Amino acid sequence: MNINKYPEIKSGSKLIKKIYVAVMLWIVGRAIQAASRVDREVKEEFNRLSDDFMMHLHVLPSGPGMIVGKDKNGKVKYMGWNPKGKKITLDMKVKNIEGAMLMFTFQESTCVASANNRLAVSGNVPDTMAFIRILNIVETYLLPKFITSLAVKRYPKWSQMSPLRKYTGRVLVYVRTFTF
Amino acid sequence: MQIPGYYEFCNKVRTVSGHNALDKLPEMLASVKSVKPMIITDKGVNGAGLIEPVKKALGAKVKAGGLYDDVPADSDVKTVKDIAAKYRAAGCDSIIAVGGGSVLDTAKGVNILVSENSDNLMNFVGFGALKRRLKPLIAVPTTSGTGSEMTLVAVIADHERDVKMLFPSLFLLPDFAVLDSRMTKTLPASITAATGMDAMTHACEAYTCLSKNPLSDTTAVMAIKLISENILQAVKKPGDMQARLALANASALAGMSFSNSMVGMVHGLGHSVGAICHVPHGVCMSIFLPYGLEYNLHKTGHLTAELLFPVKGVEAYNNAKPEDRPLLTIAAIRELNAELRKATGGKHPTCLKEIVDRNGNMMVPREVLPDIARLSLDDGTLVYNPEDLDYDDALMVLEKAWEGEPLDRRKIRKGKKTSLIKVKG
């Protein structure tokens, strides 16, 4: 069987959905960078990751996507959407745009998306777990409680995240996300 | 019953079960056009004389291309490479893996290298790395616990880098699983108990964790029923071949189930105890299982309630009020562990502080619990656990499991309650 005789069937354009997911990925990517400067827990999670950590979260077959990783100085940065020339250490693929919509309209958490076979991950398991924890914290900063509660298994209790930390962090993350 | 919006289930292992199932080996090999299989096993299995029935079954019709019996307790890359070299040198064309989880996983690793004609296992880590069918693999389990004969994954350690690598692929499913009661007859009582509870954990977590589906549920329930009905008998009367065969089937069913639905925090905690304190996996599973179910009750109480039926039988299920069933299920599992401890003369621990090595030394000192809690957070199984688990949660569960006390459910930090029944307490 010659596999080349059977070209990959690409999904329809679904332009609006792709634009929505692209915008969300941009915001989340920038917010991760911001949270790595603002939040102690996110900082510690990134410190434990290797110096060449580079995560590519993207939608199959043709995007959109986002890359977050450490630069030469060890600083966490949002590095755009194009993986060309970058050494990806953690590749998280959402299998299709519909799955991505469920995730980014917060109908499904990252864990539920994994459980429902919507995500394929290549890379180190501890890195994946760390990134999921980071994502959960960032979502708590970005979104109001009633939406975040849909996106995480357990909304942080006071003992895990005090209101002071939450609201100060939220303001700082928003400011850093939308300013250059 | 809740049907997932989307799920995948695959099991294409031809299963042969019976008191003399091994006799079918020549037919199996002929069906895959193999004339020179390599037997892979470990010293314990070979020393127990379990390779003899395999050789006898092969008879004069098939000549084994080689026997490798030096698989260590933890399958590792170096062993896999050694065996692959021997396989190639002998010109073998299939693998018969006879042993427990480590042997079966090692054989899967060997199969990757010899089928892909490679020397570097690293090229095949992660989903989608294997693209084509591998050489024929026949799995003959000699413990009733890992279910590796039915799973699509191999876990192989790289001791030089101190990491465990995961090889998940549908191509790693063995072609045949041979469940022969003779192969587990000589298993010591304590190992029968621990491995049986390992299979029980696979099934219970498959039934209650996030990736459950109707097909995995079906196999999980049957596995739990078979284990509940037969494990004590197999421990008390090792020569009871019916009980042995039932446990072998249960282990395979549980393997089929969790291979298609994953497991949760019980495995997450257990893997870390195993990694830090070198406690056998089955022992960790039997201790943590009731804690895992208890911790998730506010999310999956209704599912734990349903497990009372396969664990205790129809009468106990019918006699219990729905809101009592989840706690009765957990109590029944604790009771089973206690009975196994009695039946093994104290060799089956029911809490972490009871685990001792051959010299009677405690294997899990209380001081290492924080390290275990920290390591658990990096375990991929936590993704599939219904409730979130952070460092404090993990430490709380570990401390209770160390003492052998039930969890104080008021102290569990709960996310959104999704249990369809209100659990008492």
Image: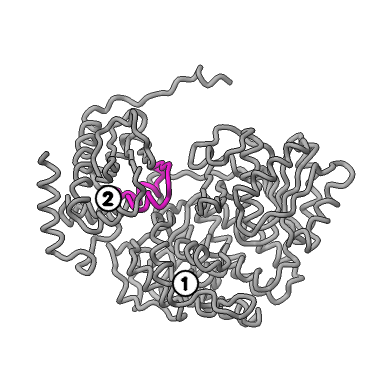
Mark 1 = which residue? B290
Left-right relation of B322 to B103: left
Q: In which quarter of the image is residue B314?
A: bottom right
- Secondary structure of the residue carrying tag 2 is helix
Magenta segment boundaries in residue numbering: A108-131
Residue ranking furthest to the front: A73
Residue ranking furthest to the top: A5
Residue B342 to residue B247: above or below: below
- Secondary structure of the residue carrying tag 1 is helix
Q: In percent of the image, x 22 and y 58: which residue is there?
A: A40
The picture places residue B29, in percent across and down from the top left corner, at 77, 40
- Disc 2 residue type? Leu
Location of the N terminus of chain B (image quadrant): bottom left
Q: In percent of the image, x 37 and y 49: which residue is there?
A: A128
**Chain letter, disc 2 residue:** A
Of B196 and A87, nearer the camera is A87
Is residue B391 among the parts visible in the rendering?
Answer: yes
